[in-house]
Image (tube, rainbow, N blue to C red):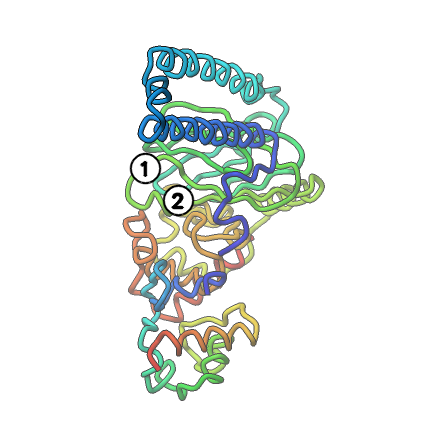
Amino acid sequence: MERVGCGSCHVIPGIGWPKGKVGPALDGLGRQGLIAGKLPNEPDVLAAYIRNAPALVPGSAMPAMPVSEQEAQDIAAYLYQHGGR
Amino acid sequence: MFDGWPPPVLDPAGPYATSVGLLSWILFGLAAAVLLVVLAALYAALFGRPELQAKVGGKTAIWVGGVAFPVVVLTALLIYGLSLTRHLSDPIRGDELRVRVTGEMWWWRVAYLDAQGREAVQDANELHIPAGRPVVLELQSADVIHSFWVPRLSGKLDMIPGRRNLLRIQADRPGVFGGQCAEYCGGPHALMGFTVVAHEPAQFERLMQARLARLAAAPAAGGSGSQLFQSTGCAACHRIAGTGANGLAGPDLTFVGNRRTLGAGILPNNRGTLMGWIGNSQAIKPNNRMPSYQGLSAEQLTQLATYLENQK
C-alpha cells in the first residue's frame, strides 16, 4: 500500500501518513455493506475492485491500481483485518 | 517505500560522500573510545582501591587526561579531517554538467544548464545525472534557507537566499538516491524530499536528447484534460512547455509523467496518487502552497490525472 500510495486518497488504519481525503476512509471497511455503494463487500470482489475499479463500477473515481492479483488479495486481507470485520 | 527512500546516511555511493562517511565513522569510533575511558575512570573513582582513587583524582590525571589528551587528539583530528575532505573544495573545472537547483517552500526547482549557462531543460523534485562523473549543482533559494542533502552522494550544503553555492555530487554507479531538505524551512519541511537518478552516460544522453526534442516539438494534444488544466487554474502556477500553461510559481509539469514521485519526493507517482494530490493535497502535505481542488468531480480528476500522466 505504501508502494502504490493508497494513503494519497484514503485514511487507512495502521498507516500514520499520508491520510488522504479524496476517497473514503477505510477504517470501518469490514463492517460496511457495499463497496463503492454498489458491490457486495467480499474479499474477492474487493481485491478485483482494487485492481480495476473503473471496470467494476463505471464512473468510479478510483483508478485501476498497479498491483498484482496476489498483492490485491493481501491488501484486501489487511483492510478486513484492520478495518473491523 | 519507493526506490532510494529513506536514504541511508552512512552508505556512500560516490567520492564526495565517501570521505564524509569515513570521517563520520572515525568520529563515532573515537567518541566511543573516549566514552569507555571516561566510564572506566568514573568506575575507578567510585569503587576503586583508595590509591587508585587518589590517582584518578590527582593533578597528573587532570593535566594528562583533561588538557594534554584532548589537545593532542583534537588537533590531530582537525588536521586529518581537513586533509581527508580537502578534495571537496577543489576548484571546479568548469566543463562538468551543471544543474541549477533552487530551494522553494517546499519543493525543488531544477534546471539543466547548457554550455552557455542557459536553462535548457526545466524540471522539479528529481535530478537525472550520468554515473561516474562529477556534476556541479548551483544551489540557491527562492525564499528561506534550505539545505540540499542527498546523503549517498555528498555532504549537506545550505541554499541561502541571495547566494549561489556550488556543490559537486557524483554517483559511481547507476542507481536511485533519495534526498531531503536538511534545514528547517517552515511548515511541511519534513515533506520536502528529492530524488537523484544516476544513469549510464549513454542512457543519460538519450534522456536529455529526448527532453530537448520534446521541448522543440509541439506537445501531444491533451483533449479534455488539457482544457481542464487551463480552466481549473492549474496553468496559473504550473508550466507545461509549448502549451498555454506558463505559470512559474509551482513545479514545472512538462515531464511530470516521468517522475518517480509526487509532492516533492513523498508519494509514488501514478494516476491514483495524482488524483489524491490534486483533490486534496492539503490533507497529504499540510500548508503546502497548492490548494485542494475539492470541487472537481471524479471524471474531472481522472481527466486531469490522465493528462498529467502523459506529460513525458
Coordinates of residue A72 in the picture (x, y in percent)? 51, 74
User: Disc 1 and disc 2: Cα gap in Å?
Assistant: 9 Å
Q: Nearer the viewer, residue B59 or B113?
A: B59
Categorize mark 1 by other alpha carbons within 10 Å: few (<14), some (14-19), many (20+): some
Of the image marks 1 and 2, the number of the one nearer the N terminus: 1
Q: Residue furthest bottom?
A: A40
Q: Amino acid at mark 1?
A: Cys
The residue that mark 1 highlights is B185
Name the side, left or right, on which A5 lies relative to B203: left
Q: Residue B3: x and y, percent? A: 54, 52
| Quarter location, residue B70 | top left
Q: Nearer the viewer, residue B274 or B298?
A: B274
Looking at this view, is B236 or A81 the one in front? A81
Dot 1 lies on which element?
loop
**Which amino acid is tagged 2?**
Met
Q: Is residue B168 above or below residue B223?
A: above
Q: Are marks 1 and 2 in contact (CB under 8 Å)?
A: yes
Residue at image coords 69%, 42%? B200
- Secondary element at image label 2: loop
Q: Quadrant of residue B84?
A: top right
Residue B205, image x, y percentages:
67, 40
Q: Which mark is residue B192?
A: 2
Mark 2 — on which chain does it sit?
Answer: B
